[in-house]
Amino acid sequence: MHATVCNLTREEYLKRITEFHNYAAPGLLVGGFMVDAARRELPEGTLFEALCETQACLPDAIQLFTPCTVGNGWLRIHDLGRYALTLYDKYTGKGFRTFLDPSKFGPFPEIEGWFLKRKAKKDQDTAVLQEEIFSAGDSILTTRAVEVSPAFLGKYSKGDIAVCTVCGEAYPSKHGSVCLGCTGRDPVVRAAVRPCLHAVPVEEAVGRQALHDMTQVEPGKSKDAAFTRGQTFGAQDLCRLQRMGRMHVYVAGEDNSAEGFIHEDDAAKALAEALCRNGAMVQAGPPREGKITLLAQRDGLFTVDRDRLAALNALADVALSVRHDGTVVKSGQPVGGVRAIPLFLGQDTLERAMRLVDAGAGAGAIAEVRPMRAAKAGALITGTEVFTGLVEDKFADVLSAKLKALGSELAEVHFAPDNAAEIAAGVRELLDAGCDLVLTSAGMSVDPGDVTMQGLVDAGVTDVLFGMPVLPGNMTLLGRIGSVPVMGVPACALFHAVTSLDLLLPRVLAGQSITRAFLARMGHGGFCLNCARCTFPHCPFGK
C-alpha cells in the first residue's frame, strides 16, 4: 500500500481526481500510479514531454499530475488503444514507457474483471476495485526504458494557415485545398432542408406545365425523361402518367415557387457553366433531369483536384462525377457529369458548391483539361554495349512512338557509354541542341555499374525524385535542369508495352507539378497485370 501517489495522500488524491473527472474513475486512479512509475525513472531536472497511447482516462492523469497538457503541446495522444504512457526527454527522446500489464493481475481479480471487461460494469464492486488499485500500486505495471521516434520530438506546429473556400474557417493548409471538415469529415450533421412543394392529382394536371423532368424506366430497354420541365400536360398524357405510377404530379404555379431554393436544372447549369469556364470543358447540351454531361473542349490531360472534388460531393445535394485524374482525352470526349440531387437545391448549398468550383486565383480548377505542349525531346541512350554497337538500340523507337502519340517529337538521339562524365556531356549536348525535354534510358538500377544517375547529377539535374511505387517502372527518375524536365526511363520500357513512363510523360508535358507525395499515392493502382492483350488506358493500371 503506497502512502502517497503523485505526492498526495490517498484522500487528497481521490479529491483531486473527483474534482477534475467528476468521479474517481478506475482508469484515472491507475493513471496516477503510472505517471509516478515513469517519472521516478527520469533523471532529476529532466525537461520531459508525454506520449499517451489511449484517449481513455489516461490523458487526464498526465494532465493532472504533470506539466504536460494537450493545450501546451507537451502531451501527444497517439491512440493505439493501449493503456500506456511514455515520459521522455524532450530533446533526446530517451525516456520510460509504463503500461498496465495483464500478466500481473493474478492477485487482483476485481482489477482483471474491470480492465479486461470480463465483468459487466453493473456487476463490479466499486469499493473492492478501488481497494485493489491502491493495494496493487505499481505492482501491476511494467516500466521500460525507450527512445521515442524523432517524429514526436520538437514543438508541434500547425504550419501555414489557410481559409477554407467552402466554410470560410481557418485550418492548417497542409490538410489540402479545403479543410478536413468540408471533405466529408465534419462531425456536425446538418439537417437537409427542403421546400414545401404541393402536388396535384394527375386528372387536374391537364393544361398545366410539369415542374421537372419525369423519368420513365423500361428495364433493359431505356431510361429517359418521358416528360420534361415546362411541358404542358394534355388529356392524352394521363394514361401514360398512371402507367408510370404517377398519380400526383408537381406542376408550375401550385405554391411551388420554393423561395430560397434553386431548381435542379438551374443549379446544374450554374455549376456546369463554372466548371466549363475554368476547366476547358463544354456542356453537351441543356440539363436533363437535373444533369449535364461535360465534354473536353480540347485535346489534353484531364486532371482533378481530388480534395476539392471530395468536398463538393460531401455537400450531398450536388454530385460531380468525373473520369480518372491523369486521363489523356481528345476534344469532344465526355469527361464528367454534374447534377443537382434534389428537385430544389438550397441556395446556401449552391453557394458553397460554387465557392469550391470558383476557388479563386492560384487554386486551379477543380477539374480541367490541361493542354500538353509539343515538346522537342532529346534522348540520351546509355550503355557501353549500345554505344559500341555490340547491341542494337531499340530505345529510341520506343520513346519516339510514345512522344508522337502525345503530340511531341523525338528530335535528337545521342549515345553515351557507362561513364558519368560522358553521360553528363551528352545531356549538355541535347540542351545545346535546343531540346526542351531530356529522356535518358536504362542505367537506373542499383547495379554498381549503372552510373546514369551520377552523370545526370554532374550535368546539373536538380529536384531529383528517384523511384516510384509503379510496376513495371520502379526505377524511374524525375528532375530538371533549369526549366527543362529530365526523365530517367528504366530498361523495363523496352520489354513492357506500358510502364510508369506512360503515366508520367503526359503529366510532364502538361506541366503538372509532381512531388514525392504524389508519386507515393500512385502505388494504389500502380501494378500492371501484363495482360496478353494490352488495353491500356482502358484498364485499372495507374487509376
Image (spheres, grey):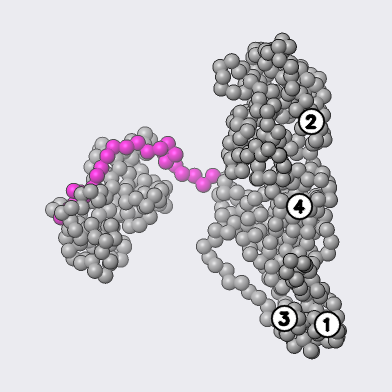
Which stretch is magenta?
135-159
For marks 2 and 3, the one nearer the N-term is 3
Residue 492: assigned label:
none
- Dots 4 and 2: beta carbons under 8 Å? no
SS at badge 3: loop
Q: Give the side of residue 356 with respect to residue 231, left or right.
A: left
| Mark 2: amino acid | Ala
Most distant residue in the top direction: 388
Mark 1 vs mark 4: in front:
1
- Dots 1 and 3: beta carbons under 8 Å? no
- Where residue 403 sits in the image (x, y, percent)? 78, 32
- Dots 2 and 3: beta carbons under 8 Å? no
Q: Quadrant of the C terminus?
A: top right
Classify mark 2: residues with Cα within 10 Å, few (<14), some (14-19) or many (20+). few
In this rendering, the answer to whether 338 lies above or below 206 is: above
Give the distance between the C-alpha atoms of the residues marked 1 and 4, in whole angstroms.
36 Å
Residue hosting label 4: 335
Residue 245: assigned label:
3
Residue hosting label 2: 401
SS at badge 4: strand
Mark 4 vs mark 3: in front:
3
| Mark 4: amino acid | Val
